[in-house]
Amino acid sequence: MEMKLPEKVKRIIKTIEDAGYEAYAVGGCVRDSILGREPDDWDITTSASPHQVKALFRRTVDTGIRHGTVTVMVDREGFEVTTYRIDGEYEDGRHPKEVVFTKELEEDLRRRDFTVNAMAYNDRRGLVDVFGGMEDIGKRLIRCVGSPQERFGEDALRLMRAVRFSAQLGYAIEGKTAAAMKSLAGNLGKISAERIRTELVKLLVSPHPDYLRICYETGITAVVLPEFDRCMETAQNNPHHCYTVGEHILHSLRYVREDKVLRLAMLLHDIGKPETKTTDGEGTDHFHGHGPAGERMAERILRRLKFDNDTIDTVGKLVKYHDYDVEPAPRCVRRAIHKTGEDIFPLLFDVKRADIMAQGTYLRAEKEEKLERVKAVYGDIVKAGDCVSLKTLAVSGKDLMEAGMKPGKEMGEMLQKLLEAVLEEPGKNTKEELLKLYEYFLPSFHKIG
Ligand code: ATP
Ligand code: MG
């Protein structure tokens, strides 16, 4: 079997081989090349020690020298070159607690998580596949290298990696591997939030985000996202819905594009439903206020998983407003843009569409049509450049000061009132008009003051 290695990777392998050692492309890049996917990065594994590798190249970086990894720089591009090793227990995923270097490629492949990730390749020897990676690619299976119980016992993050690769590749998880996952899911409690976050995001932005279902079935979410388990257990007896809250969430994930923020928003959009559920006299379920309640929960969850503030903030707002109903009239849409935020509002179209698609068919066409009308109105507003925030209001605090107003709370309220007038009638957004309005509003302000 022949594989096309990038020139730079060939050069690194040749340099190491010319010095009398072995070197191979290994892991994800081999898997992806076989599958005709563009590898993210090219990892190289070698029999040479880190010091021997460093001696062979002009520019190297000690990325993880204790664990055998040296980054070799070719032009401006870095390639991780790692010495064949046998791992002990893992502490953070990339770095096992103790490593033993070895002279055998096979030993290095044995420490890797799944058969599809445990293949190596170079032009001299071709594909090295000692654990049946090609066979499992043929069967479309994620299978542990060796004993699944042992492998998951060494590093519980591998449970989430199994689901993640399954979702990325559309593969099933082999029976014994899946059984071991069920029995060891509790160990995920020992894994750091950062490592869990990384795998969760990769799963969510994959072609099969709904494979999160496997995380529920194996007990992974019970540990890392118990709020989702509550959703899986919450029925929705309501004409709009044909699924439990959890199943609806899983479906909604598929209807939004592969974007981190949008997929997180769908994951969490109804997370507030279990705790806001009420059932009326007719037996119909309601979830009043689940948006704002969900925002608070989403923020807590994302903080716990160590997401950055920007992501927490954006996802929180999308959760809060996902169910916010907007009429397709220009003044209503301008108000909605102002209320939700100029950056958030356009994202709500994606969120709302996915939400609708994952609901029952009752009124679906009407809901979609209304959303399209709001979208058209939004397009007109953007095209016209209508003012929807203080940023583009034709008067500023400075203008009001020049007109005689003192800075402070009243001035803030005045600007807000002027903005509201402009949201009603964008034509009023001129300095002249707004200063007239200012004079008109002023007496009522003095009464308050
Ligand atoms: P991608 O980079 O597309 O996310 P990948 O397969 O390259 O996928 P990485 O996390 O970059 O995954 O790891 C590179 C290789 O290192 C894997 O293919 C696997 O062989 C090995 N590996 C990584 N993490 C682990 C782990 N926790 N346990 C065992 N082997 C691992
Ligand atoms: Mg990789």
Image: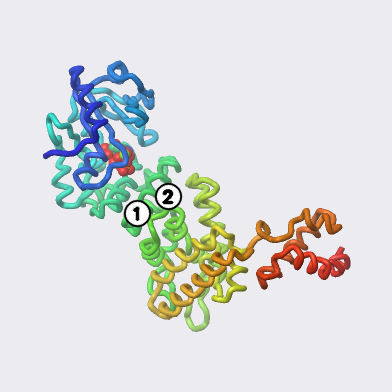
Residue 88, quarter of the rendered image: top left
Mark 2 C-beta to ligand 1 under 8 Å: no
Nearest the eye: 314 or 167: 314
SS at mark 2?
A: helix
Mark 1 C-beta to ligand 1 under 8 Å: no
Q: Which residue sits at x=21%, y=46%?
A: 143
Query: Which of the two labelled residues, at mark 2 and mark 1, occupies the earlier sequence position?
Result: 1
Residue topped by disc 1: 215
Is 299 placed left or right of 266 in the picture? right
Q: Is residue 160 above or below residue 16?
A: below
Task: Please give the label number shown on residue 283.
Answer: none
Q: Which residue sits at x=57%, y=60%?
A: 342
| Mark 1 neighbour class, 10 Å CA radius: few under 14, some 14 to 19, many 20 or more | many
Q: Which residue sits at x=41%, y=79%?
A: 365
Q: Which residue sits at x=36%, y=65%?
A: 251
The residue type indicated by label 1 comes to Cys
Q: Is residue 429 above or below residue 93?
A: below
Q: Quadrant location of the N terminus?
A: top left
The residue type indicated by label 2 comes to Val
Q: Report if the CB atoms under discs 2 and 1 are less than 8 Å apart.
A: yes
Q: Quadrant location of the C terminus?
A: bottom right
Q: Quadrant of ligand 2?
A: top left
SS at mark 1?
A: helix
Q: In this view, does 83 lie above or below 151?
A: above
Is 307 placed left or right of 86 in the picture? right
Residue topped by disc 2: 224
In percent of width and height, residue 291 lies at: 54, 65
Residue 328 appears in the picture as rendered: yes
